[in-house]
Image (cartoon, helix red, strand yellow):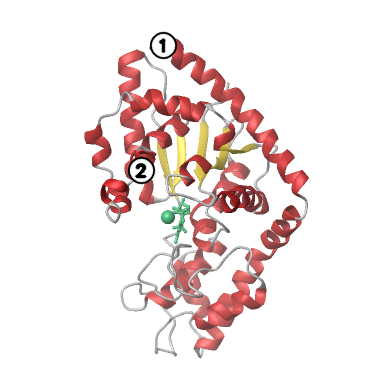
Amino acid sequence: TPRSTVFSLIQPTGRFHLGNYLGAVRNWKDIVEYAPEPTRLIFGVADLHAITIPKNAKELRDNRFEAIASLLSTGIDTEKAVLYHQSAVHEHAELSWILSCLVSMGNLNRMTQWKSKSSNVGQNASLGLYSYPVLQAADILLYKSNFVPVGDDQSQHLELSRTIAESFNRTFGKTFPLPNTILAPTRKILSLKNPEKKMSKSDPAQNSCLYITDEPDIISKKIKKAVTDSISHEFKYDPEKRPGVSNLINIVSGIQKKKIKDIEQEISAFKDHKQFKDYVTDIIIEELKPSRLKFNELLSNKDYLYQAVEKGNEKARVVAQQTIKEVKQKVGL
Ligand code: ADP
Ligand code: NA
């Protein structure tokens, strides 16, 4: 049995952008690389969560595989980590139902993500969107996860997962460890066009996102168009007064895993915006190049991709089936 389990899922909502990369999947890759043996490492694509907001079937089908390709393209080692599709493991839905009978509507009503996502649609919001955090708890607990690397926007859901685990343990006997959040070491990446908001693929503004599949000329164009400010002699990190410049510095700091201060030192002698932006552009192009090439290669070899994910699905099922057997037995099913 493993010493501890690290687990996380990401939604298949199209190509990954630099925020997803620095805020999530590159950390997964690092965790896989540096986790001590015999940590159990399980990462996947949350395709059941994706349909809480209606999706076009063809698009979803493509996105599910593009998400797996994106994960593989960052270099996650599948000898060490499981990479799988949530919907391929039926036990997620089964455990979700059992846990939904232990959580109060009062607790779900307090979820701020539910409040904001349902506010536009009111009573038309789906039951699935409402119970999203219960499915998330089931995902985590199904693998008896100890550590869950997620963005800070997920902290409240992780807290609920702990509440649900405690409730199950109290009612049926100790079964689940209480999962801990691992927050990303990089500060949030902001939109290139509106550095007040986070970089997000749902942002309609043109050129606001850098995708890990962007060709060098596209990256170059987007950075040229990125909003900065009129101060051109000194490039310093000041997120309040200079959000655009600071966002680019933060991106470089994230990519190079260097302190903001060290980046400031490197750029202190820069004379103009062009020099600053060329520097940022080169670093991003260099970082994303291997992922882009690998991604394109993977998408041109679909059979390999399907086989890779099916292997992951199989490994995930083995763990999931053990847990659900134990859970049903304890519940009396
Ligand atoms: P989006 O906002 O583009 O829809 P998601 O909400 O699907 O992205 O996020 C997937 C993962 O990527 C989460 O772990 C989230 O914390 C991380 N993430 C998304 N956007 C950013 C960002 N701008 N900066 C840092 N991390 C981000
Ligand atoms: Na989002």
Label 2 packing within 10 angstroms: few (<14), some (14-19), many (20+): some
Q: Position of residue 281 (x, y in %)?
A: 59, 76
Q: Give the residue at mark 2.
A: 126
Q: Residue at the location (32% across, 49% down)? A: 113
* Secondary structure at numbered mark 2: loop
- Any mark on residue 330, and which? 1
Query: SS of the residue at dot 1?
Result: helix
In front: mark 2 or mark 1? 2
Task: Tell me the residue at 55%/68% (across/down).
Answer: 210
* Depth check, front residue: 82 or 57: 57
Q: Nearer the viewer, residue 266 or 124?
A: 124
Q: Nearer the viewer, residue 142 or 46?
A: 46
Residue 218: horizontal and vertical position, in percent? 62, 76
From what the image shows, is residue 295 above or below residue 123? below
Q: Are marks 2 and 1 in contact (CB under 8 Å)?
A: no
Return the disc, 2 or 1, that comes first in the chain's sequence.
Answer: 2
**Residue 31 relative to residue 157: left or right:** right
Q: Residue 89, labelled with which disc?
A: none
Report the Cα–Cα distance between label 2 and label 1.
31 Å
Inspect the image, locate mark 2, and give the three-letter code of the amino acid beneath it: Ser
Q: Dividing the image into 4 quarters, which one contains the N terminus?
A: top right
Q: Quadrant of residue 79?
A: top right
- Rendered image quadrant of residue 198: bottom left
